Image (cartoon, helix red, strand yellow):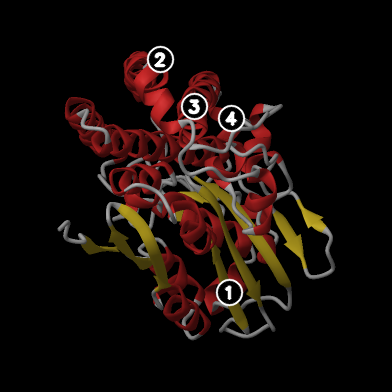
């Protein structure tokens, strides 16, 4: 008599946890729970001062600290009507795209690991370590906690170090064909993943999905391609650093399966590398007069803001203007938004955070129910969830 085999898998990470029940090698149940980390963060932000919140928000997400901090800082800049200098916009865009490239590579590494291609996973981890060492050399820090400040960023990219940055991402460009040969041009992988984890465009819209997962289903949505800040009067406030490089077209696929998401990750890596090269080339030729009005510290590394656009009295007192607005950024795996409401006091009246992981976890149950046991981690990896485990 054949015995029934069943097991339960639990995956925990910062945002929540996933409980998966498997019977006879097939997923029969999937429960997702969201932790209270963001609710607690909202309560903290509402009860602390402006400068304390900037320091706190940068520690909220380790793997996406740059984009998460940018969402909050941009919202405050809109509330205080602070103008960000061009050079600081370039630095912000370069770092955000660098974080996107590394995140997508780690996601592809997890996918490769799920199908047993361990050497590719090890190579991507080596690239990640090399990226941290490069950032430490250029910015004198291996992480970007407290890196963004109101009106700019704490460190500048020295002109003589721009070539190092360009060379590193040219090396990443040489790795992309290897990833394509293993995943994209592999008929076995294509046949296996073409029917896995399918999300239609209507389902993606229904679950409010964003990022590569939504674009792989044909949903034309990218925060970088739109006005990313909306006030309570529904008037849009253009506050995107991405306006500095001209036209932008999101990468779109229509199948909505694991294979389509792999294609989107790879093409977005190439797109981000091109964006970074444009910004780095503009930094390289930018004349000194374009940032002489900025406050620069004794080490000639810190680049803050245009002095004429700052209300120092409001910042010193930590006052939030009487305004309500929602600001969003395009994190590597989707939209991260923050809603702020100020009433002219030193504490925010209200703060709400919208994280794309909330929506991904809601959709996960439908995606993996009925799938085979060996495909579970492959599907979850393609959603970018394992990048933050």
Residue occupying the point 43% across, 53% down: 368
Q: Quadrant of the C terminus?
A: bottom left
Find residue 352 and report its image quarter. Answer: bottom right
Residue occupying the point 77% across, 65% down: 231
How many marks the image carries: the answer is: 4
Q: For residue 243, which numbered disc appears in the image?
A: none
Residue occupying the point 54% across, 40% down: 212
Which of the two labelled residues, at mark 4 and mark 3, occupies the earlier sequence position? 3
The residue wearing badge 4 is: 289
Marks 1 and 4 sit apart, C-alpha to C-alpha, by: 40 Å
The image shows residue 317 at horizontal and vertical percentages of: 55, 79
Residue sitting nearer the eye, 200 or 109: 200
- Mark 3 is surrounded, within 10 Å at the Cα level, by few (under 14), some (14 to 19) or many (20 or more) other residues, namely some
Marks 2 and 3 sit apart, C-alpha to C-alpha, by: 11 Å
Q: Is residue 339 in view?
A: yes
The image shows residue 300 at horizontal and vertical percentages of: 37, 39
The residue wearing badge 2 is: 185
Q: Is residue 26 above or below residue 54?
A: above
Marks 1 and 3 sit apart, C-alpha to C-alpha, by: 33 Å
Q: Is residue 13 in view?
A: no
């Amino acid at each position: 008599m054949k015995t029934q085999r069943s097991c339960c898998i639990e995956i925990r990470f910062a945002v929540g946890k996933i409980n998966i029940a498997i019977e006879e090698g097939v997923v029969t149940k999937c429960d997702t729970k969201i932790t209270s980390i963001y609710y607690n963060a909202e309560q903290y932000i509402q009860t602390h001062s402006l400068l304390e919140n900037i320091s706190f928000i940068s520690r909220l997400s380790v793997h996406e600290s740059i984009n998460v901090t940018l969402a909050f800082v941009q919202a405050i800049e809109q509330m205080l009507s602070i103008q960000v200098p061009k050079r600081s916009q370039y630095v912000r865009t370069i770092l955000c795209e660098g974080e996107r490239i590394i995140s997508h590579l780690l996601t592809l590494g997890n996918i490769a690991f799920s199908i047993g291609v361990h050497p590719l996973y090890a190579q991507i981890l080596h690239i990640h370590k090399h990226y941290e060492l490069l950032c430490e050399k250029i910015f004198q820090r291996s992480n970007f906690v407290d890196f963004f400040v109101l009106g700019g960023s704490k460190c500048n990219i020295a002109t003589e170090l721009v070539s190092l940055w360009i060379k590193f991402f040219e090396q990443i460009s040489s790795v992309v064909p290897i990833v394509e040969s293993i995943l994209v041009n592999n008929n076995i992988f294509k046949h296996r993943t073409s029917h896995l984890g399918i999300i239609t465009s209507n389902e993606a819209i229904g679950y409010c999905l964003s990022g590569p997962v939504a674009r792989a289903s044909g949903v034309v949505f990218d925060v970088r391609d739109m006005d990313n800040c909306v006030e309570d009067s529904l008037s849009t406030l253009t506050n995107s650093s991405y306006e500095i490089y001209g036209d932008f077209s999101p990468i779109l696929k229509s199948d909505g399966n694991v294979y389509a998401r792999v294609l989107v990750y790879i093409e977005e890596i190439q797109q981000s590398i091109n964006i970074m090269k444009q910004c780095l080339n503009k930094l390289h030729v930018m004349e000194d007069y374009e940032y002489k009005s900025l406050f620069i510290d004794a080490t000639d590394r810190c680049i803050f803001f245009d002095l004429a656009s700052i209300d120092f009295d409001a910042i010193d007192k930590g006052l939030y203007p009487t305004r309500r607005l929602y600001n969003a950024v395009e994190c590597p795996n989707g939209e991260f938004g923050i809603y702020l409401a100020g009433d002219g006091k030193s504490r925010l009246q209200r703060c709400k955070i919208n994280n794309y992981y909330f929506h991904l976890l809601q959709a996960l149950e439908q995606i993996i129910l009925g799938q085979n046991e060996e495909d579970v981690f492959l599907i979850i990896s393609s959603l970018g969830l394992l990048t933050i485990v």
